[in-house]
Amino acid sequence: MSKAERREVQERQRAAKLLQKQQKPPGAPVTTGPPSKGTQGNDPPSTPKPNKAVFSGQHKRSGSIYEPTTPGRGTFAQNADDAQSRKSRGLMIFSHFSLPKQLGQGVKGDIHPAIVRLALLFSEFKICGANARCIATLTAFKTVIQDYTTPEHNTLSRHLMTHLSPQISYLVSARPMSVSMGNAIRQLKLEISKADIDRVEQEVKDELCQQIDNYIRDRIIVADEVIEELAGQKIKDGDVILTYAKSSVVEKVLLNAHQEGKKFSVIVIDSQPLLEGKALLTSLTSTNPPIPCTYTFLSAISSVMTEVTTVLVGAHSICANGAVYSRSGTALVAMIAKNHNVPVVVCCETYKFSDSVVLDAFGKNELAPQKFDRRSDAALASPSSNLEILNPLYDLTPPKCITAVVTEVGLIPPSSVSSIPMALGRISI
Amino acid sequence: MAGTHAEEHATPAIFTVYKSYQRHLANEQISTPLAAILALTDLIEFSDAGTMFELVKALNEGAETLKSKTANPISLNAGCELFIAFVTLFPHEFASFIDLKKELIRQGRRYATEALTYRRKIAELALDFIKDGSVILTHSYSRVVMQTLLLAHERKRISVFVTEARPRGLGQVILGCFLHVNSIECLICARIKTAEALRAAGIPATVVLDSAVAYVMDKVDFVLVGSEAVVESGGLINAVGSNQIAIIARAANKPFYALAESYKFHRLFPLSQYDLPSHNARLFSFPSPSQASAPSEHTARTESIQSLSHEMSAPNTQPINTGKITQEQISQENPDVDYTRPDLISLVFSDVGSLTPEGVSQYLVGMFAG
């Protein structure tokens, strides 16, 4: 090691020390974004000591890619080398996408073990998909409610709410709340507030759990069965159905139609980084006899679209203006289908309807955790790399690209989405 | 099978729902959905159902009978659906079931009488959109369009292009009774009917070939069509050719107006032409070559289509092999109705108001989803 090199190393170490000192006061251990939340200790480079990695001179990417450029980081940008500051600046416009938090950071109050466990599963993407997350959350809340006792001089209808809010915040710190969860929790809170203060606590708790069960049954399970039937009617012999990534509803629709003896084939379109289509492909081909499937990446979409009769996709949520918020890539699929005059059918339960109006996917989105990026070690960790990774999880399909939305109340055009909650006689969705 | 219920418990006059339906349909003013509603009302009268469940079951069976006897059941379905939904949701606040039945019959008949005034209402609504000196393009024959045009003629100067509307216009004569029974809309020679009726009323009218619509479109101020059914997407099901007129109107930036009585609103969501209930494998099937020298089939999809077309077009193979194609064959291999996408429609005039296609779908969602 030459003198100059040694000096460089020393200087870097000094800078790192200085930075650590500066950052310590504001909060507990400094995190570097999704890697620490997303990987929680099974991915060595991004575990507890990320700052060292950033300044170790090897330009390990270790999360600095996702670093939000908050004002507090100003000193960091000045101290760091050119490449680092460029990176930070490059991602500034996306810094509002689910600001990475440490699990449970800033959450006050007792967290129930069921919630801690669930949060971990969420952050690890072990439980993924709007329906699965909603059911898991509600089931965990049932445990929380059963284990809850109202403190003295308090009523359940008022205190249970304050007991639940830190649990919800904890879950949100693992992964931003999905619209489905938001709607379900709003409904639960409404039920809690309606609880009679004169009744026996256990009775009220049992009733709440019963209501949660009913919600899961009516709005998710039975709704899915109705959607299966309605969407199944649109699949005819000889059809070629195209689907993107994996939606639990679409999977059920296809399997159900296959079981009814319809002869159709499926094109599964998939894309990085989550590669969810693989799971769908496995489940579609493991039937007896298997459904004829084609698996390809998003880049091949325009080549296969000419063969397709119907596009069938799921949704994370649907906005009041009929725009579909779904796995990123869906918008592209829908637009290409529209261009080829292929009907685009979205399967979505009404409990996923959101009363907000979203105009693009930049306002609200989420970034895929780094662990899903398979190219990380080889291509991106090289010292010369100025490459930034941005993997938004969702995108927004404009309503004009959607032919029909299949819900449990029937097939509706996207323009009528806003009139459904009223038709169901609900004030809140 | 279906409808036996209705026939079993028939009165000495031997009531069948289908006969009743045809009897009502014979009235020039009664359209298919209304005839269906009246036939089902008659069915209530003759039915000896003792409970609501039995009654609804009988009605569903009656609707099935009617459906099975018509080739193009779309507008008929709309009427049946409306009436059965009405019966199911009717408040049960009567002393006896007999009273309830009487009330249902009274309501059904009253609705039918009231529905006859809808066309006048629609004509009044549409009138505001017809300017003095307008040139209008209309398609096939529709009573509500006729009434609107005649009303407009009383107050404004209009001239009308009428399309030839094949196969209904021409195929009608050749197919004889086949279509005649099925759809009241296809009265003898629709095109001549519309044009002649208009001329008789003193409205300048010219018959335009279906293939000349694009030629004439630049001279037209707007397009006015009737409808077989208005569906949940806000789209329109109407005599075949409406879709291409709508596409041409859009290309020429001309408004495309549809007229539809609210009993034609139908809870159906076709994704494409081939998703219509009236579509079957016989339509546009290719005649199977008589020799088994068919080219090797690549996919399961073409295979199934070919095998289907083989079955369906079997009776037609003979004339084709001799090289002669008859008009009858053409009519049989072509659809009666087509589906017009909502984004091609400017407004739908109905007795519940002038609605945008989105408004139609919201109205339908509110009516049935609630």
Image (cartoon, coloured by chain):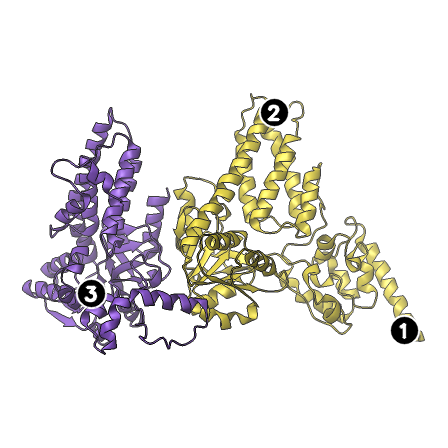
Judge whether A315 appears above or below B311 on screen: above
Question: Gap between marks 3 and 2, in whole Å?
Answer: 69 Å
Mark closest to the chain's N terminus, 2 or 1:
1
| Chain hosting mark 2 | A
Q: Is residue B217 visible?
A: no
* Residue identified by numbered label 1: A5
Q: Which mark is residue B139?
A: 3
* Residue identified by numbered label 2: A202
Nearer-the-camera pick, A365 or A407: A407
Q: The chain coloured purple carries which letter?
A: B
Nearer-the-camera pick, B24 or A219: B24
Q: Do callouts 2 and 1 mark residues in contact (Cβ within 8 Å)? A: no
Nearer-the-camera pick, B265 or A230: A230
User: Which secondary structure, mark 3?
Assistant: loop
Judge whether A38 appears above or below A181 on screen: below
Which residue is at a point 63% across and 57% down the rendered structure image? A96
Amino acid type, residue under disc 3 in the picture: His
User: Which secondary structure, mark 2?
Assistant: helix
Which residue is at a point 56% across and 23% down the rendered structure image? A197
Q: The chain coloured yellow carries which letter?
A: A
